Amino acid sequence: MTQIKVENATMGYEGVPVIKDLSFQIDEGDYVCIVGENGSGKTTLMKGILGLNPPLKGSIKYNGLDKNEIGYLPQKKNIQKDFPASVMEVVLSGCINRKYHIFHNKKDKENAIRHLQMVNMLDYKKHSFSQLSGGQQQRILLARALCATEKVIVLDEPVTGLDPIATADMYSLIKDINHKGITVIMVTHDINMAVRQASHILHISAGTEGTNFFGTAHQYVHSSVGSKFLLTECPCDVCTHSHNKEVK
Ligand SMILES: Nc1ncnc2c1ncn2[C@@H]1O[C@H](COP(=O)(O)OP(=O)(O)OP(=O)(O)O)[C@@H](O)[C@H]1O
């Protein structure tokens, strides 16, 4: 089932386009990595998907979900490191559904504990968030994002600043979350990981006249845009993936 359909979308700010005429669709359970050069508009597109910055032209439509039900792990900013709250408070803050209530009920607390368990951080629930390592903080912020959703999670460069072990750990958690049926949409600069882990790749080219790509990870590896960016062989076991999505 298609969950998010982007049709001929032009995204930008104050009437000035950053991305032009982009079309793709995300189905339930997909794992989509959004890649591309710095400044090409990946975060701008994320903000569009989250409903924070609607398209200047075209449309983003949701099927079987409300945009308020999308969990979001934003790009790491230094200010987050010193957030003066306990781990539990940070995770619970993700449970506030913008529409319905501002106080936490029993269900929210159970939800927070379930997601702390999922990211293997339950033992830290009373710790101060600011005293955790960068990798631990990212796990807590992942649990926070999961509290907002049962369906789709959007991650903006979730491994920035993490060491190789914490990075592998984070990727493994994200893969598990996807295996549980949650659709994953992730901005990343790690293209080699993206083609190994994602089901689909969206490549946004810098400049509004560049060619964008959307297709399976396998199609991307064999595309002209993908082959310029990749330093790896196709990770497919067998190169027989069905090419069933339109690429625009
Ligand atoms: N709030 C804003 N107002 C105006 N222009 C903006 C705003 N946010 C971003 N931009 C511009 O939009 C363009 C795309 O930015 P965006 O952050 O989406 O790129 P990106 O692909 O996510 O970059 P990076 O890989 O460096 O994170 C850039 O030229 C940026 O300066």
Image (spheres, rainbow, N blue to C red):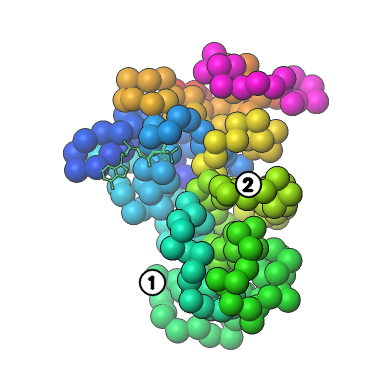
The residue at the point 53 percent across, 85 percent down is 105
* Residue stretch in magenta: 224-240
Q: Which residue is mark 1?
A: 99
Gap between marks 1 and 2 measured at Cα: 25 Å
Rendered view: 129 above or below 156: below
Percent of width and height locating residue 69: 48, 61
Residue 69 shows in the view: no
The residue at the point 32 percent across, 29 percent down is 20
Percent of width and height locating residue 241: 70, 24
Closer to us: 145 or 6 = 145
Numbered disc 1: secondary structure: loop
Assign the magenta stretch its main secondary structure: loop
Percent of width and height locating residue 60: 37, 43
User: Sequence-wise, which precedes: disc 1 or disc 2?
Assistant: 2
Asked if the magenta segment contains residue 134, the reply would be no
In the displayed structure image, the side of residue 165 where residue 40 appears, left or right: left
The mark found on residue 29 in the picture is: 2
Instruction: Give the quadrant of residue 152.
Output: bottom right
Name the quadrant where ligand 1 sits: top left
Residue 205 shows in the view: yes
Amino acid of disc 2: Gly
The mark found on residue 42 in the picture is: none
Numbered disc 2: secondary structure: loop
